[in-house]
Amino acid sequence: MKLTAVILITAVLLSLACKADYDIKEVAPPEHLGLEHHHEHDETDHEHEAETVELGSVHDESHEHDVSEISGSNRHVHDAGERSHCTGWFFNQPWAASFIWGKMVRDAVILLVLSAVILFVSGYRRKHQ
Amino acid sequence: MKPVMTFALMTLRNLLRRRTIWGIIIVILIALFGIGQIPSYGVSIEGRFILDFGLFGLEIGALLLAIGLASNIYPRDREQKTVMPIIAVPLSRGQYLMGRFVGASIVEAAAMLMGCIGLMIILLMNGHAIPVDMLPATGLLLVEGWFLLAVVFFFSFWTSPPLNAPLTVLLFIVSQMSVSGFIKLFPQAPGLMRTLRLLLPHMDVFHIKDPIAHGMDIPGLYFLLAIFYGLAYMAFMLSVALAVFRSRDLK
Amino acid sequence: MEDYPLQVQELEKTFRKKLGLSSFKAVDSISFQLSTGEVLGFIGPNGAGKTTTIKCILGLLKPSNGKASLWGLHPASLEVRKRIGYVPENPDYDDSFTPLEFMSMFSSMRRLDMSQERMLAILDRVGLSKWENVRIRSFSKGMKQRVSLALALQSEPELLIMDEPTVGLDPVARKEFRDIILAERQRGASVFFSSHLLSEVETMCDRAVILSKGKKVVEGRLEDLMRTEDHYSVTYRVSDDEPEELEVEAAVLQKTIDDLRGKGYSIIGVNPLYRSLEEVFLSVTSGGAG
């Protein structure tokens, strides 16, 4: 009976946690992805970008920012914090996606509650074995 | 609390007397030194390169340290039967786990601090400024290391040391993946893969080497939230590890 | 109901093997108890289930059935752990520490707040007075056993649980261990110890439990166990000569006494014959096979 209750509580809490989707590309608002400004590019898929960027040629992005440093092989370099079609992946990380921070807190709380439940139940079972 | 801290100190002294730890720390420091010696290669600005690779080295160091420190503690205690008199009399199983964990955590923290200071020295020696967020970033990597320690302890209660290391590394790798990336591993069952991925930790929360290398400001609130998340996951792993340990027979 | 320092009720421990497809019953429904101030010997051949029982008593193993309680409490409870001392079989400690370091750490873990003098006195009592600052790495098996005993004694336990404490010790060390155990009993502690050295049990124990193949085969006071029920010794005197002794079966005891009296001999005493514990042990364990 107690074990069933614990499994139920755990399942409910985990199902809540499962709703927290950290795949920023899936949950990001359009303004985060910069679609308004860069609709000509698909910025959300860096891997795809990497395949399509022609290596060995300089990309002209002077309409957005200066290419601050080009050296060695002809790669394009963005200024720090500059968003462009090649830096989407850079901003699709939790530190830059404040809209998922709430989910981090919620998951942390769920994990703490689960920890307490697990500790209590395993202690109870040990004492009453 | 006193029994746990005493046992943690006992663990700390024991770990420091083992050669493995010093081996790993020396490897991390040599790696950092090596990064400082590499010229810019024209890839990017040298300072960014050192920072980026240095922080990456620290993260891998945290993983290796966690495995090196904790994968063998409990199996060794069990094999040599040193765990028996400790658990039979002065300590409960929970106190044993916490004592061992805290002892290993202190070593991990000291090693990460050494790594961070080493990286700072290399940056200064190469004429680069030390970013303001360097210490908090190391702190986040340390929380990640502590979480990994908890994972290693969890695995050590039901598997052998040779299996512990690959399982921890596997968890470390898949926990870096995005949900969509994880689904691509087995696209035939996207629902299952999505659920599985969401149950695993999100280690990208701890990754801030890119913005730091690019000199960007990271909100202080983010550090706090990421630390809270990391510590909560660590607590969860420890409680699961303890539940497993409590159910185990000490033959 | 009295809360015995140790009570084992219908204790059973089965180990699953080969993915749970087969199993092995190491301890099979045994019950006994230990009273306050008593020394109870736990005897059995190798593999009889002694260590498994002790581990169940200490909460290191989870019984498959039945239970072990100490003062009526669960073995893992803090209250119990404060009151017991444990000497494991072939103890092994982290060998980078010294006995004094161990004493200090264990006393802190047990919240005993002991002075260094007190710790040194205990180490002296177990014969480690000149070794307190030497790392255990260089210790022999017997010396490690002494460290173990020192740790067990440090809290002045109300119950000492010892698993084969004198195995591998030389005769002098065994005698020292015996003296310490007897001194602990005099202090008022209860002692539960397993052994297959029957002479030891014979000299120290009030009662014994004999185990064979996981089952309890005999339990009782040593005197009762060793006393035969079918053989008696009759001591008599012929005029002023030295007394003589005659061993007779119970069935013919009365007839023998009558015969001796008929011959004018005086009967000095009639006592049951005692077997050695080894004889008892061998008879109940069918030759000692576990």
Image (spheres, rainbow, N blue to C red):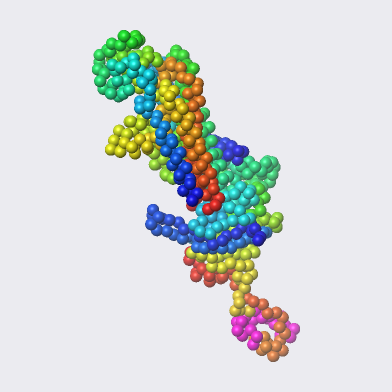
In the rendered structure, does residue C251 fall within the stretch colored magenta? yes
Q: Using the rendered image of the protein, determine whether residue C178 is visible from the camera's viewpoint.
A: no
**Is B92 positioned to the left or the right of B237 in the image?**
right
Q: Nearer the viewer, residue A28 or B158?
A: A28
Q: Nearer the viewer, residue B208 or C280?
A: B208
Q: Nearer the viewer, residue A114 or C156?
A: A114
Looking at the image, which residue is at 30% across and 38% down?
Answer: B189
Image location of residue C87, percent across then percent down: 58, 52
Q: Nearer the viewer, residue B72 or B219?
A: B219
Residue bounds of the magenta highlight: C233-255
Q: Residue furthest right?
A: C240
C219, above or below B64, in the image? below
Quadrant of the image occupied by residue A33:
top left
Quadrant of the image occupied by residue C10:
bottom right
C46, above or below B14, in the image? below
Image location of residue B93, percent across then percent down: 54, 45
Looking at the image, which residue is at 50% across and 39% down?
Answer: A115
Image location of residue A63, percent across then percent down: 31, 9
Q: Using the rendered image of the protein, determine whether residue C116 is visible from the camera's viewpoint.
A: yes
